[in-house]
Amino acid sequence: MAKDKAEIVTQKTQDKSAFSQYEALQEMSDEDLMSQFQAGTVEAFNILVERYSDRLMQYLYRFLGDMKRCEDLLQETFLRVHRNRHSYRRIAKFSTWLYTIAGNLARSEYRKRKRRRMQSIQSVNRDNEEYEMEIPDESFSPDKHAESTIQDHYIQEAMNEIPPAFREVVVLRDIQQLAYDEIAEITGLPMGTVKSRINRGRTKLQALLKDVYPFESQS
């Protein structure tokens, strides 16, 4: 009996210690968490996934408009973070490094989709006669009964209408709330180009959404 009590006390002490360690990790910066993860603390990686999953999903969805594919890309993003953790250096913000990975995957997916669509539209049959194949609708169809999701649908439709070069920077700035210099680093674009594309993207969105969801002017 005494041994059982001792084991219970030991287990409770270990559980309390583990919880305290997790709380301490929760208070760390992204960069410190990556250092912990590089040193072998898996819980640090799990916290980073928790911090950024929703934001990254929103970024990918606004860029591509395909919820199912975005879920795959989200998993692939964190898989690459896990696999390439030792290539990260603290000279860069973790968020910049993370969004660069996700952005590269999203742009690659967009190019693949564009090629597939062009091939489908211009496919030829065995008699070399051009015909148009049915292209599946890959867009996400939200619940039409909720006003907020209807607005979200129109916003995404408008996002899909503007060029991807504008769409990406607008999402990073106005939805993800990233700084201009971070966007420049993520996209590899000069600062002037980033600001120009954001302004032009906002203008196009304003025109598309003026009757549904006014796009407020932002700095």
Image (spheres, grey):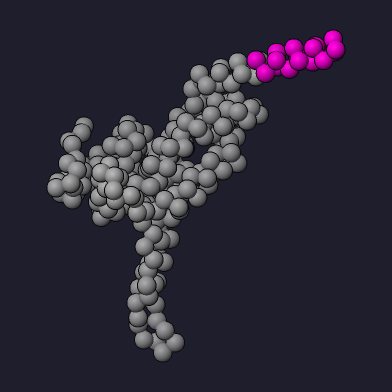
Residue drawn at x 46%, y 37% is: 53
Extreme residue in the top direction: 2
Q: Is residue 29 above or below residue 59?
A: above
Relative image position of residue 128 (x, y in whole percent): 39, 87
Q: Quadrant of residue 14?
A: top right
Q: Is residue 146 magenta?
A: no
Quadrant in which the N terminus appears: top right
- Identify the magenta region: 1-16
Residue drawn at x 28%, y 37% is: 174
Quadrant in which the C terminus appears: top left
Relative image position of residue 204 (x, y in whole percent): 19, 49
Q: Is residue 7 magenta?
A: yes
Residue drawn at x 63%, y 30% is: 42
Q: Is residue 139 above or below residue 56?
A: below
Relative image position of residue 109 (x, y in whole percent): 43, 55
Q: Is residue 219 visible?
A: yes
Extreme residue in the bottom direction: 127
**Residue situated in front as seen by the camera: 78 or 212:** 212
Q: Is residue 197 visible?
A: no
Q: Quadrant of residue 171?
A: top left
Q: Is residue 210 above or below residue 183?
A: below
Residue drawn at x 76%, y 15% is: 8
Relative image position of residue 10 (x, y in whole percent): 75, 14
Q: Main secondary structure of the magenta part?
A: helix
**104 left or right of 132 in image:** right
Q: How many marks?
A: 0
